[in-house]
Every structure is written in C-alpha cells, then in structure tokens.
Image (cartoon, coloured by chain):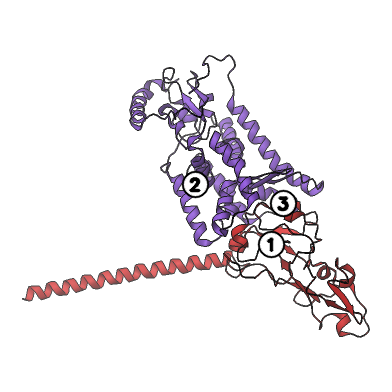
Amino acid sequence: MKKSIQEETGQTDRLAKGSTSRRRLLKGLFAALLAGDTMVNSLFCHAENGLSSPVRTNILRPPGAVPEEIFPAKCIRCGRCVEVCPYEAIVPRDIRNGIYAGTPLIDVTKIPCYLCMKCVEVCPTGTLSRISQTETRMGLAVIDKHSCVTWNQELALCRTCYNVCPFKEKAIKLDQLRPVVIEEYCTGCGLCTHGCPITRKDGNKAINIEPIYAFKPVKW
Amino acid sequence: MTIMPSNSPVKTHYNHLRLLCLSLAFCLLLIVPFLNKYLHFSFIQGWFQSLSIGHLWFVSPLEGIESILTSKKLYGPLLIGMLGPVLLASLLGRVFCSWICPISFLSEITDRCIRLFSRKRYRKQHSPMPKSMLWFALLGEIVLTLIIGAPIFVFLSPPGLVGREIMMATLFHTLALEGMIIVAVFLLHLASRRFFCRYLCPLGALLGIIGIKRRLLVVKDAETCIQCGLCQRACPLGLDPAINETLSPYCWNCGECIDSCKVKALRFTWKGPCQSAPISGLQDITHQSQKMHLGTGEKAQL
C-alpha cells in the first residue's frame, strides 16, 4: 500500500517535471518567435508589416496597373517598365517593402508620369494592362483648398496646375480663375502635383494625387 | 540513338565555348541598362526574368508559373513568352543554368581564379546534402508562394537579382538591399562548390523537370571508359558520368566532363524523337558504381 503511494507520488513528481520542462520549451519557442517577429518588423520598417501596400498619396503605380490586391501576385518584378521609362519616373522598391519588393512605383512629387505609355507596352504579365492615355487612372488630383494660394488668397493668381495639365480644360478647369479638377477626365499623372509651388509641412503639395482606384476589390 | 564518330579530328573545347557564352550573356546584362538609359534604345530590354528583343519576348518559366498560380489569371503574352525557354529546356535540358545564368558566370570565374592560385585542377567535391534536395527546394518555394500569395522567387532569385542590381546601379546609382542574397550564394559557392545550384535553385529544378526527356545528352562510351574518375571530379554538380548520372535530370549539359575526359569516352549525343531514352536500369548504375569504386584506386593517378 505504502509502496504504491510512493510510486504514485513519484509519478506525479515526474509528471510535474515533464510539464515544467514542456513549459520551458514552450516559453523558449515563444521567445524565439517574438525575437523573429521583431527582427522581421525591423527589417520591414518601411512598410508597416511588409504586407501592406506602399501605394499612398502621391506614390502611385504606373498607368494601367491592376488593383493593389492582385498587383504583388501578378507582377514578376522583371523591371522592364523601369528600364523603358524615359523620364526615370518609375522606381522599384527594395526588400524592406516585404512582398511588395521590386514592384514599380512613381513618386509624382519627384518625377511625375508624362503619359508616354511605353511601360504598358512592355509589361509581359499584364500587370500593366495596355490602355491609352485617356483611359489611364493612376489616381485623382485633389486640391487642398486651405493650402492652395489661389483658393485661400484673393490676390494670388497661381494657375500652374492648370497650365501643366495635359488635359487642360477637360481635367482641370478654371472656375472664377480658381482651379477645379474634373474627376471624369483626370488621369492622375501627377504633373500638377509636380508643378505645384506650394509644399505643405507634411511634404505634400497643395494639389495631391489620391490613388482612389488602386484599392478597388478584385473578382478572383 | 545516333552516335557521332569517336575519332573526330578536332576536339571541341566546350569549356571555352561555355565561358564565351556566359561572358556574352553577362555583357548583355551589363550593356542593356546603359543603352536604355543613355541612348533610349529599347530594342533589347530586361534581363533573365523577362527579356525582350524587339517583339520577341522571353519570360522565365518559374516566374511565369508563379504569377499565374498566385493571380489565377492567364495572359497571352506571358504564356507565349514562356514558350521559348520551355522549348529550350525540353530539348537541351538545364542549359540556361550552365551556359547563360549570371550566377554560373560568377561561379566559373571564381573557380578559374581559384585554379590559378591552387595547384589542383579541380576543387574538392563536397556533398553535404542529397541531390534530391533540389526538388524539395522547388516544391517548398511554390508552396510558400501560394501561402504568402505573392511570387517569392521573382524578387529573391539570384539570376534575376544580378540583372536587377546592375539595372539599379546604372539607372539610379544605388543597390537594392536584397543583393545580399547574391553575396550569400557566392559565399556558399566558396564553401562548397555550386551549393545553391546543386541543392537550392528552384529555377534549376523546374528546368530540370522540363528537361527530363531532353534530346541532348552526355553519353558515355562504356568500352572506351577506363573509370578514372576525372569526370566526376570535374563535374560542377558533383555528378558521376561514369555511372551514367549525366542521363539523370540533374545534368545541365555543360560539357565540363567531356573536356576532362582523357580517353574521349564522353560526348554530346542528340537523341532522335522516336528512339527510347537510353537510361539503363538502376541495377546497371549501381553495378557500374561498384565496378568504379573497385577501379578508382589504381586509375586515379591518370
């Protein structure tokens, strides 16, 4: 009887030992996971987690791009759109953008798209579909009426955005000498943003391109 | 099987030919971004992920397959672009790896430099892993691609990365961070000959699979072969032509073994379409390997 009790206690001891060692193992594994996670996070510091799209205000995809949901899957990062762009507007991103590494982007505040449509001709995967200038929808120009000198001051008569727009009188019109964007015709090429003389504190201009078409849902 | 006459007067030096081909391919990678940037010459464009010569487009099959798998959409030009490389691989096997790939070029150059400084003709063969690792690399890569939902090899493939880094350096005077992978592959090559090509390259694995029934084969003449083991030491993939491993899907038809053979027992052979594959049964291979192991001792001095 005594013996059996002793045996039992021994067994429970062993069980307890087993569970503690298992706990230690799990703890170790968890710590390793955390360490790996922080490492990956620090590596992908550019994007929030390497899985979110780098497309945002004034940072756009080249013309004819498929929606962001499918873009990293379809693009094979061959860089031919980057090579063909005569203005060097298209720049590929590096590994810090996670799964978006190597995908082409246009920062219109640096170099805008001049709509030469060479990139859509060379894309081998159909990630940039073959469209014409007028069909291009890289985004929509939005005027910040608080920053725009023509809108917030009565006297200033800047109309640079109107002057540089390739679809003048269609995409941008002047309403009592103040620029107004017509959504129907704006291609989002960013020439107006690049030309705008006003730079806000956050680095954006008084007229910015919002990539409103890039986040359309995709029918799989 | 057609067998060319063994006593051909001029011996082809495949090593020189291959080095020339690799250098030309590498020069293409170097020159094309310059032409694109400074002369706006876009007749030739891209690198080995997608190369265009005029209206002739080539797309690397692995990248194309990954793109199709993850986006679940077929695109005509992509399929047509993949046709060329697939055809090449199905006829000639993994020749892209040995005759064109820029990683192969860099490895060959290092091997030649090492040969200059060390007295040994060939580097020591290590085989830290089984050769079948290559297939698992391809499988793992495709599974990972499907899990993540973005093609991985397209931005992490060393052959493509060399092209991208050259392009980045030319166009933007900077280098992308992922170029470290090339350095890693290079260091692995220094530690163990062609480590990445032998065990880890998914593109090589895919081309190998496509080329299982290839027409161009390195074939051994069993009567002339003296089992000296030189070809085994020469092979960059660590295969042994003496036991007909050149007929396996791993062989990339580089011709290194043919050049190394002193008795001209090995040669390239074009297998006709209706003839059956000359792969002899497994027992034959094992039998011959036993024979070879018996014979290596005396004949190694050759």
Say whether residue A213 is left or right of residue A22. Answer: right
Q: Please identify the quarter of the rendering in which residue B12 is found.
A: top right
Residue ID at (23%, 71%):
A15
Chain B: drawing colour: purple
Chain letter, colour red: A
Whether residue A184 is visible here, answered yes or no, is yes
Q: Chain of mark 1?
A: A
Rendered location of residue B77, percent (x, y): 65, 49
The amino acid on which the numbered mark 1 sits, given as a three-letter code, is Ala
Mark 3 chain: A
Mark 2 or 1: in front is 1
Q: Is residue B120 visible?
A: no
Q: Which residue is mark 2?
A: B200
As shown in the figure, which amino acid type bears the numbered disc 3?
Val
Q: Quadrant of the C terminus of chain B?
A: top left
Q: Position of residue A134 (x, y in %)?
A: 79, 64
- B284 sits left or right of B301 in the view: left
* Amino acid, disc 2: Leu
Residue B176 spot, x, y in % from top left: 65, 55
| Residue on which the image places disc 1 | A65
Q: Dot 1: few (<14), some (14–19), or many (≥20) neighbours within 10 Å?
A: many
**Image location of residue A197, percent across then percent down:** 86, 73
Looking at the picture, tell me which residue is in the foreground, B194 or B70: B70
Q: Which mark is residue A122?
A: 3
User: Which comes sooner in the sequence, label 1 or label 3?
Assistant: 1
Residue A175 sits above or below residue B153 on the image: below
